[in-house]
Every structure is written in C-alpha cells, then in structure tokens.
Image: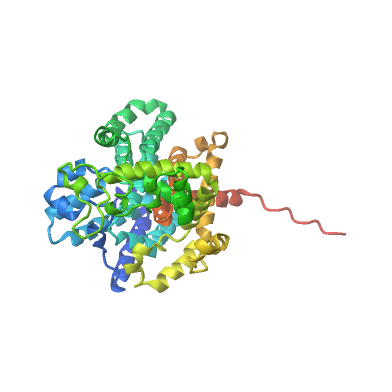
Amino acid sequence: MSVFRASSADPRGARKLLPPGIVLAGFVLSRVLYFALGVRFDASPLSWFWQYIDPALLKSDFLRSILYLHSQPPLFNVFLGTVVNLFPGRETAVFAAAFLLCGVALALGLYLLMREAGVSEVTAAVLTTLFITSPACALYENWLFYTYPVATALVLSALFWARFSRTRRTRDALGLFSFLALPALTWSLFHLAWLFLSAAALLALSPGARKRILAALAVPLLLVVLWYGKNLLIFGQFTATTWTGLNFSKMTNGMLSAEERWQLAQRGDISGVSLVPPFRYVEDYRQYLELPAPTGIPVLDEPLKQSGVPNFNHKLYIEAGRRSGVDAVRILSLRPRAYLDGLALAWLTFLLPADAYELLLPNRRLIPGIANSSNAVYNGRFRFGINHTLFNSDRAAYFRQSFLNIGFFTLAAYLAAFAFGVALLWRGRWRRHPAGPALLFLWFTVVFASVLGNATEVGENNRFRFALDPLALVLAACLSERARARFARRPPAAAPRRRR
C-alpha cells in the first residue's frame, strides 16, 4: 500500500507513516508489558486438545494422519506437524514466534483495512491500538489454537477485497482468495458455502473483472473442495468435519435432563447414543455402537492419545456424530424449548468478553486487574460471576444472571455492525460508499459466522466471536465516522427570535 512506499524525505510521506508506526509501537510496548507481567506462550494444548492429531503420530505418521483426518479441516494440524518435525525440542519458541508475526499482521492489516473503509487516520490508529493491545488479543496470541490466525486471515482477506475493489488487480484477487481459503481449511465454521457465496458476491459486484477473479479463485477453491471431496470418498460425508452432529447435540440434547433423555430413548424417539454425553471415551459408546474393524491406520484406530485423552478422530466418532445429529434434530422437533434454551445460552456466551474463556486462565490469572478493567471499559461488562448451578434448578434466573454479565458495549457494537450492513444494502447504498463491496463482505462474514456458530453449537461462543471482533470493529467505526460526518454537515439551529 502507498502508506509504506512513502519516502522518509517527504514530510507528507513521513506523516502517513506515523499512524501505523504508533500502532506498531503500541503493539511492541504492550507485548513487553504482558511479558513482564509473566504472560508466556501456552503450548500445552498440543498434547491434549481434541482438534489435534496426537503429536506422536504427527512425528511418526504425519502425512497419512493428515489424509485420514475427518474431525477437522487439515491446515492447523499441518502447521503443528511441520513445526514438531522441523524444530524438535524448540516447538514452543517457534509457535510463539509464528503467533507474534500473526499479531503484527493483524495490527497492520486492521489499520489498513480501516483506512480502505474510509475511517480517518486518527480513528483507525486509535481503535487498532486499543484492540491490538487489549488483554484478549494478547491472551489469544499466547495460546496455541487457531482462533488468532483465523482472525488475522479474515482481516487480511477483507483488506485484499477492499484493495481489489479499488484496483482490480489480479494479485489483490489472489491475496483475497488465498486468505479466504485459510479459514475454510482451518475451521469448519467457515464452511465451503461461506467461501462459495463470497466468491459469487465478488463476481456479481465486479462484472468487468470476472476472468481475473476466476483465475485467482481456481486453486484456493479447488483445495477446499478437494478436502470435502476426500471426506466424501473415504468417510461418506461431504463435509469439513464429522463432528457436526456431536456439536449440535449440545444445543438440544444437552439442554435436557438425564431423565428426559432416558424417557425419549425408552419411547424410541432417540437412540441410546444420545444417552452418552457428547465427546466421551470410545468405551462409553460401546454399549450402543459396534466398534469399527481395525483399519491399520493409527489415527483412526487408536482410542487414546499418548497423553491419555481420547482420540476424537477414531473412526467410531463418525457414526456417533451421525446418530447424535439425527437425534438432535428429532429432539428439536419434539422439545423445541430445549433448542430455544440452547440458542439463548449460545448468544449469551457469545456476548461475554472474549477473554472470559476458561482455557485462557493460565495466562489470564497473571493479569486479573488489567483484564477486568479492560472488560469494564471496552466491553461494558460490569458484573463478574455466574452461578452455574442455577442452570439446572432455575434456568430463567440463570439466563437473567448471564445477561447481566455480558459485555453491553460489545452488544452495542454488534448491533451497530448488523444495522450498518442492512443500511448499506437498503436501496443499493453500498454503491455510494468507496469501500462498499468490502464492507458488504465484512458484514456477510460477521453475520454468517455468528448466526451459524450460535445456531449449531454452545459452550465456546465467545471464543468464536474473537475471530469476528476485528471485522465488527471496522463496521462500527465506519458507522461512527458516517454519523460524525453527517452531524458536522448539519446546519446550525436557527437562533430563537427575541420577544418584543
């Protein structure tokens, strides 16, 4: 971007470099501060997180384990396997360096995206600095999970979308679709449908550049389709993950009491699989599912990882997920109130501060004052603490208490972002905005991922939201800038006439 091509001898160029320089300075200083307070990169998830292939198999059977991975899209496990094989004994340092680079890309990408969207230099620099130095951002940056890289990829894809809308250059389209493919190959929430609809929208909005778009789209889209096709060919499901049924069962089955589930199973309304809570050991399902015949492929056959946690890529979980999904839909039709409770809980969790997530606690415990103050000032969370026992004894009281714990500023920002997108669509107003197509992409991604995520899974929804927060922040900033500009153009009120 021209901001980085400016000559240091040109005062105007130097002035343009100042805001991103301030953003980077804030990023560096905040990371030094967090490090001084004891925050360190947490690579412990490598050995036990459900989404990861056993590190022993990443070392001994890397490529075959990736090929037979059915529980997750492959890209983050490819990253993990590459690091553990190329840097044995230094994995944590390499992971930390890679995530730190993601942080730099996120900081610069978010600032440049705001500028492309028409946000002023000062506002873009301030908002980006506030976001990138926040405790939530630092905590996700120091935790070995794909949420932070996906947040970075979404910002960069939106940046390239805005640049392509302005330049119509093939290289910008290639950057756009490369960064769009990264989330689709990392996190099943960013479904093939999201990628396809995004591409279709860009083709519709750029009729004069369709050849360049298709040329840039071909390889990234093919890679995503090939992954889905591989799962169809080997496992019989055209999907990025076979956990969909297990996840969705938490939205319906998980809202019922054990007695209610037992009654439904006794009547034959649901299978015995749904008497087992989702994501349990292989042995827990043996009463209701026949153990698949050994395949000779460790990532499909081993019930446990070397750390002793379940290997949720075991072949049995394909059938467990399928039956759980069928039962979940059946419960939805028989007990719609259960699904409504699941939806309420998902959205309330979604609106909690992103750092109010239990797996971030090892680092969050080191900065409780900063984290709580940030939640109050930036997220608008003024109450801390939920009595989770109320969920079973008094669910209405539990939901009321949960609502009082959400981030009210976060709620306002997302409502503003949703409203801004609707306003852009109304009578084609996006055509009058210089970054209209890119803003529509931001809005579509925020709406798609938040609605789909909260409609199909409950439990980690505030983690989901962190990946969308930068995009929602850009939309809210654009809406604020437009409101400020409209107010500035408003003629002064006429002075009241004096009475004679």
Towards the viewer: 229 or 194: 229
Is residue 190 visible in the rendered image? The answer is no
Residue at point 23% right, 60% down? 96
Is residue 482 visible in the rendered image? The answer is yes
Residue 198: which quarter of the image?
top left
Q: Would residue 416 be found to the left or right of residue 367 on screen?
A: right
Q: Quick one: which residue is furthest to the right in this view?
A: 500
In the image, residue 244 above or below residue 168: below
In the image, residue 390 above or below residue 118: below
Residue 277: percent from left, percent from top: 38, 54
Q: Quick one: which residue is furthest to the front in this view?
A: 266
Towards the viewer: 204 or 405: 405
Quarter of the image with the C terminus is bottom right
Colouring style: rainbow
Towards the viewer: 57 or 394: 394
Residue 176: which quarter of the image?
top left
Towards the viewer: 119 or 498: 119
Q: Would residue 73 be found to the left or right of residue 479 on screen?
A: left
Residue 356: percent from left, percent from top: 42, 63
Q: How many marks?
A: 0
Residue 428: percent from left, percent from top: 54, 34
Residue 236: percent from left, percent from top: 29, 34
Quarter of the image with the N terminus is top left
Residue at point 40% right, 48% down? 274
